[in-house]
C-alpha cells in the first residue's frame, strides 16, 4: 500500500512502479536470506521443486476510504513462474477505481465559495466553513507489470521489466533493469537498479495557464469557451522520470537480515497539478480571486533506506520483528522521515490451519516545499525572483505528520494456500509551516485532519 502522504493521485503509477523496483532489486538475495532468518534450509525435495516450477499466484482486494473525501477500490493479481534454470517470470495486473471529493487547494472561508469544474463544464459551491472539495474526482486505472529474472553467471543475477499504466487522463510507460551480485557465501548481496518512465498527462479541460484566474460565471454564455481558452496553454504535457537504486543486503546470522538502499530520482517535465488552485486573499482573509498553481518543471529526489528483520526464538513464540526507516530529501526542500514496523506472531494451530497475527505501526513526518503557500495575498502578485514564480497550496507538499495503526490476520488452508485480512487506520495531520493567518481565518480550520480506513483481503494459491 502506498500511503497518501505526499503522493499525487494522478501520478501514482510511477511511484508504485518505483516501489516495486526496490522490492525486485533484492528479491534474489532475500530468497536466500529468508531461509537463514526462519531457520529453514535452502534445499527442497524433488516434489517441492516441481511445485516451484508451476505458477504461484497472489491476489488482493484493497478498499481505502477517507470518509467524505476519496474512496478507492483496488484489485491486484500477481503470478510467478519458476523455470528449470531458476529463471523467474512475474506478471502483475492492477485495476483500481477512485471516486469522491478531492481538495482543490482553495482555503476555507466564512462564506460559501463558487468554483468552476476542471473541465470548464459547470460549477460547484462549497458551504461556508468547509474545506473546498471538488466532488467530481473519478478515475479508473489499469496497470500491467512484467519482470524476468535469471542467473547470469555464478553469483550474478539479472532482471529486466516493463510497466504500462493507463488512466482516463494519464498514460505511463516504463522499463527497468537490475543486476545483483552475491558474495561471502551468498550471505551478502549488492544490487544496482535503473528505471525510466515516460508519462503523458491529458487532463479534461486542458493544461491551465500558471497564475491565470479561474473563470467563474455562466458556462452557457456565448463567450464562455473563449474566456476558458484564455486560461489554457495546451491540451497535454509530458513528464520523464529516471531512477537509480543501489542496494546492499546482509545476512547477519540465522536469525537476522539487514538491508540498506540509496536511491536517486530525476524528474523532468510537467509536475504541476492542473486540478489545484490557490486562493488570493485581501488583508482580512477574504478570497478575492483563485489562481492556478505553478510548480518547477524539474525535481531531484534522494533517499536512504534501512531495514532489519529479526526472528526471535521459541521463548518469544517464534515472532519476527520487521523495522525500517526511510529518509527522503529533494531540491524542493521537502524532507521526510518514515518509521515503519511490523511484528509477525505465529498463533497456535486451529482446525489444522497455521495462523498468525501481525500488528503494524507507521509514522511519517514531512516538511513543506519551498514554494508551498496555503494562500497568497493580492499585493504579492508581483514576483521578483525565479522561486517566487512557483506556488502551490496542495496540502500534500505541505508540512504534516501521519500515523498508521493496524493489524493483519492470516492463516494457511489445508491445501497449502494462504489467506489474510488487514485492517488499518490512517490519520494525516497537516501543520502550519509558519504562515500568519488573517483575522477572518483565525476561527476556521485551515489545516483539516484527514482520516482514512484501509481494508485488504489477500489470497495466495498455487
Image (cartoon, helix red, strand yellow):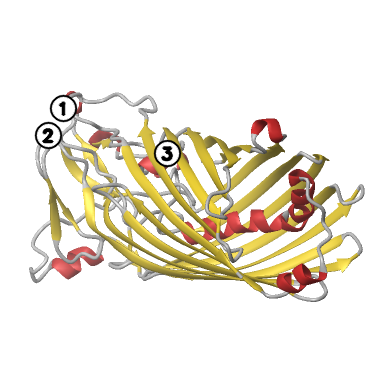
Left or right placement of residue 131 versus residue 3 in this view = left
| Mark pair 1, 2: CA separation | 7 Å
Q: Name the residue under label 3.
A: 371
Label 3 CA crowd tier, 10 Å (few <14, some 14–19, many 20+): many
Residue drawn at 65 percent across, 55 percent down? 23
Label 2 CA crowd tier, 10 Å (few <14, some 14–19, many 20+): some
Residue 164 visible in the snapshot: no
Q: Is residue 142 above or below residue 212?
A: below
Left or right placement of residue 29 versus residue 287 in this view = right
- Residue 438 in percent (x, y) is at 21, 25
Secondary structure found at label 2: loop
Q: Do the residues labelled 2 and 3 touch (CB within 8 Å)?
A: no
Q: Earlier in the sequence, mark 1 or mark 3?
A: 3
Residue drawn at 49 percent across, 61 percent down? 13
Q: Name the residue under label 1.
A: 440
Q: Mark 2 points at which residue?
A: 110
Residue 345 visible in the snapshot: yes
Q: Are marks 1 and 2 in contact (CB under 8 Å)?
A: yes
Quarter of the view holding residue 253: top right
Q: Which label lies toward us, 1 or 3? A: 1
Residue drawn at 82 percent across, 66 percent down? 45
Label 1 CA crowd tier, 10 Å (few <14, some 14–19, many 20+): some
Secondary structure found at label 3: loop
Secondary structure found at label 1: helix
| Mark pair 2, 3: CA separation | 26 Å
Q: Closest to the observer: 447 or 75? A: 75
Amino acid at each position: 500500500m502506498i500511503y497518501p502522504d505526499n503522493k499525487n493521485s494522478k501520478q501514482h503509477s510511477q511511484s508504485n512502479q518505483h516501489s516495486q523496483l526496490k522490492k525486485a532489486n533484492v528479491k534474489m538475495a532475500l530468497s536466500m536470506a529468508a531461509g537463514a532468518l526462519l531457520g529453514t534450509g535452502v534445499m527442497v525435495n524433488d516434489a517441492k521443486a516441481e511445485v516451484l516450477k508451476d505458477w504461484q499466484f497472489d491476489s488482493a482486494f484493497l478498499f481505502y476510504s477517507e470518509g467524505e473525501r476519496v474512496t478507492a477500490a483496488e484489485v491486484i493479481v500477481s503470478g510467478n513462474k519458476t523455470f528449470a534454470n531458476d529463471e523467474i517470470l512475474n506478471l502483475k495486473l492492477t485495476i483500481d477505481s477512485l471516486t469522491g471529493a478531492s481538495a482543490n487547494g482553495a482555503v476555507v472561508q466564512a462564506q460559501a465559495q463558487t468554483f468552476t469544474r476542471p473541465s470548464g463544464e459547470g460549477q460547484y459551491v462549497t458551504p461556508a466553513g468547509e474545506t473546498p472539495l471538488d466532488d467530481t474526482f473519478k478515475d479508473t486505472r489499469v496497470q500491467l507489470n512484467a519482470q524476468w529474472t535469471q542467473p547470469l553467471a555464478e553469483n550474478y543475477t539479472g532482471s529486466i521489466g516493463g510497466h504500462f499504466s493507463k488512466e482516463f487522463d494519464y498514460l505511463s510507460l516504463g522499463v527497468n533493469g537490475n543486476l545483483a551480485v552475491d558474495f561471502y557465501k551468498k550471505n551478502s548481496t549488492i544490487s544496482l537498479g535503473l528505471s525510466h518512465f515516460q508519462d503523458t498527462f491529458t487532463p479534461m479541460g486542458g493544461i491551465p495557464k500558471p497564475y491565470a484566474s479561474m473563470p467563474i460565471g455562466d458556462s452557457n454564455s456565448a463567450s464562455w469557451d473563449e474566456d476558458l481558452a484564455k486560461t489554457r496553454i495546451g491540451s497535454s504535457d509530458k513528464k520523464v522520470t529516471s531512477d537509480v537504486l543501489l542496494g546492499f543486503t546482509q545476512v547477519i546470522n540465522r536469525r537476522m537480515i539487514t538491508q540498506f538502499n540509496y536511491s536517486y530520482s530525476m524528474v523532468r517535465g510537467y509536475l504541476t497539478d492542473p486540478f489545484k488552485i490557490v486562493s488570493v486573499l485581501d488583508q482580512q482573509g477574504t478570497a478575492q480571486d483563485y489562481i492556478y498553481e505553478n510548480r518547477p518543471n524539474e525535481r531531484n529526489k534522494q533517499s536512504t533506506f534501512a531495514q532489519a528483520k529479526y526472528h526471535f526464538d521459541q521463548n518469544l513464540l517464534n515472532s519476527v520483528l520487521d523495522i525500517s526507516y526511510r529518509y527522503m530529501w529533494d531540491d524542493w526542500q521537502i524532507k521526510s522521515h518514515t518509521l515503519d514496523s511490523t511484528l509477525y506472531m505465529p498463533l497456535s494451530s486451529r482446525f489444522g490451519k497455521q495462523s498468525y497475527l501481525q500488528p503494524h505501526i507507521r509514522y511519517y513526518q514531512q516538511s513543506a516545499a519551498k514554494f508551498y503557500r496555503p494562500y497568497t495575498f493580492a499585493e504579492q502578485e508581483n514576483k521578483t525572483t525565479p522561486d517566487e514564480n512557483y506556488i502551490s497550496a496542495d496540502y500534500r507538499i505541505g508540512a504534516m505528520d501521519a500515523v498508521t495503526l493496524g493489524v493483519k490476520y492470516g492463516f494457511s488452508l489445508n491445501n497449502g494456500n494462504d489467506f489474510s485480512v488487514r485492517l488499518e487506520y490512517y490519520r494525516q495531520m497537516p501543520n502550519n509551516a509558519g504562515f500568519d493567518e488573517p483575522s477572518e481565518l483565525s476561527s476556521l480550520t485551515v489545516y483539516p485532519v484527514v482520516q482514512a480506513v484501509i481494508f485488504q483481503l489477500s489470497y495466495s494459491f498455487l
